[in-house]
Image (cartoon, grey):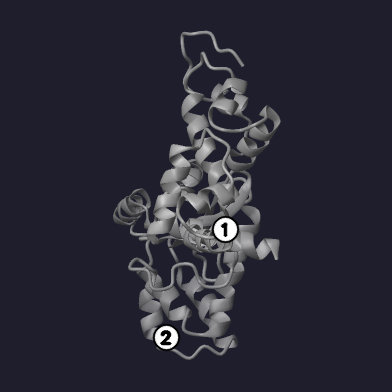
């Protein structure tokens, strides 16, 4: 049950990320520069990543028409997903094409992948195509093999060095998405009920105070039960987690000031104990407040932890 709730929240977050201006601008720039598709997908493997994409490889689009070849693509997708826990991972499919996945995290939790590929990293040969067609015939694929051959040999070719550089850029972008995922988790992705908008504003205005579900629901003139269900449906996360995210975002800003102690920041943003603050901060960002501060640009002033 808890896993289902987390999966739903992660899918909601990915939806927010995919609709963000930053991701859409990057996707357009990436596809224009490389001619390759870019997909932001959930961690679960249940459908071919680039299906219906403008830059989907025509050969792969033909393959996706049958369940067996589609399953072969999913096997590669699953393989790179399993191996891309901490960093990017690339794999070659049965047709000799390369696919890559870059993990996206919310703190330490894996929420999805950036996936691209469907290209050759070396010039395809007649022997490679013959092996591919024999495999497809064995799987029972019925298609226009002349059309398939044309699509196969018109597949984009990227040198290993260029592909490695492209993956590195994608990895940097993936790390950036991971950093801002907490910020996007507390922002609106779509129009939401006015009562939720008022509740969010109330939370932001009173985040340094002790907040409870009952207090906020009363402030927006709804019952606690109704407000709890509506808030989760509208935001994808529960009330307590949302408040924690708002406070952590405020804390990240205050950590820029080297003259503020970690304990001062914890109480300033509304946490009632330093231990609780440290635990929540690490859960949402994947690192402690002290580690987060250490990775910020150095200041001339002496830092006091």
Q: Looking at the image, which is closer to me, 84 or 280? A: 280
Residue at 46% across, 13% down? 299
Q: In the drawing, what numbered circle is on residue 145?
A: 2
**Residue 176 can be seen in this image:** no
**Quadrant including the N terminus:** bottom right
Residue at 47% across, 49% down? 219
Name the residue beneath numbered marker 1. Answer: 224
Q: Looking at the image, which is closer to me, 106 or 51? A: 106
**Residue 223 can be seen in this image:** yes
Q: Looking at the image, which is closer to me, 152 or 273? A: 273
Alpha carbons under labels 2 and 1: distance apart: 62 Å
Element type at mark 1: helix
Q: In the drawing, what numbered circle is on residue 265?
A: none
Which mark is first along the chain, 1 or 2?
Answer: 2
Q: Of discs 2 and 1, which sits in the foreground?
A: 1
Residue at 60% across, 52% down? 110
Residue 2 position in % (x across, y down): 69, 61
Q: Are marks 2 and 1 in contact (CB under 8 Å)?
A: no
**Quadrant including the C terminus:** top right
Residue 268 position in % (x across, y down): 54, 26
Vertical side of 228 occupied by 242: above or below: above
Q: Looking at the image, which is closer to me, 67 or 182? A: 182
Residue at 47% across, 47% down? 186
Residue 267 position in % (x across, y down): 59, 27
């Amino acid at each position: 049950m808890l896993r289902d709730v987390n999966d739903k929240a992660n899918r909601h977050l990915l939806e927010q990320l995919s609709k963000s201006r930053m991701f859409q601008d990057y996707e357009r720039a990436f596809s224009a520069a490389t001619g390759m598709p870019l997909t932001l997908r959930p961690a679960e493997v249940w459908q071919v990543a680039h299906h219906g994409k403008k830059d989907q490889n025509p050969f792969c689009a033909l393959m996706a028409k049958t369940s067996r070849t589609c399953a072969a693509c999913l096997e590669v997708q699953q393989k790179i997903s399993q191996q891309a826990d901490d960093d990017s991972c690339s794999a070659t499919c049965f047709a000799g094409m390369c696919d890559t996945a870059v993990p996206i995290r919310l703190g330490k939790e894996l929420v999805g992948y950036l996936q691209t590929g469907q290209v050759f990293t070396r010039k395809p040969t007649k022997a490679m195509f013959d092996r591919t067609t024999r495999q497809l015939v064995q799987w029972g694929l019925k298609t226009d093999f002349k059309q398939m051959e044309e699509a196969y040999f018109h597949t984009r070719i990227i040198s290993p060095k260029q592909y490695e550089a492209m993956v590195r850029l994608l990895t940097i972008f993936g790390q950036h998405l991971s950093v801002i995922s907490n910020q996007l988790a507390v922002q609106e992705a779509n129009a939401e009920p006015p009562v939720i908008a008022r509740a969010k504003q109330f939370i932001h205005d009173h985040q340094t105070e002790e907040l409870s579900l009952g207090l906020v629901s009363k402030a927006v003139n709804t019952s606690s039960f109704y407000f709890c269900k509506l808030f989760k449906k509208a935001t994808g996360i529960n009330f307590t987690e949302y408040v924690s995210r708002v406070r952590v975002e405020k804390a990240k800003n205050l950590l820029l000031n080297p003259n503020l102690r970690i304990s001062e920041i914890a109480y300033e943003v509304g946490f009632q104990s330093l231990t609780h603050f440290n635990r929540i901060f690490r859960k949402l960002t994947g690192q402690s407040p002290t580690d987060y501060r250490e990775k910020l640009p150095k200041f001339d002033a002496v830092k006091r932890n």
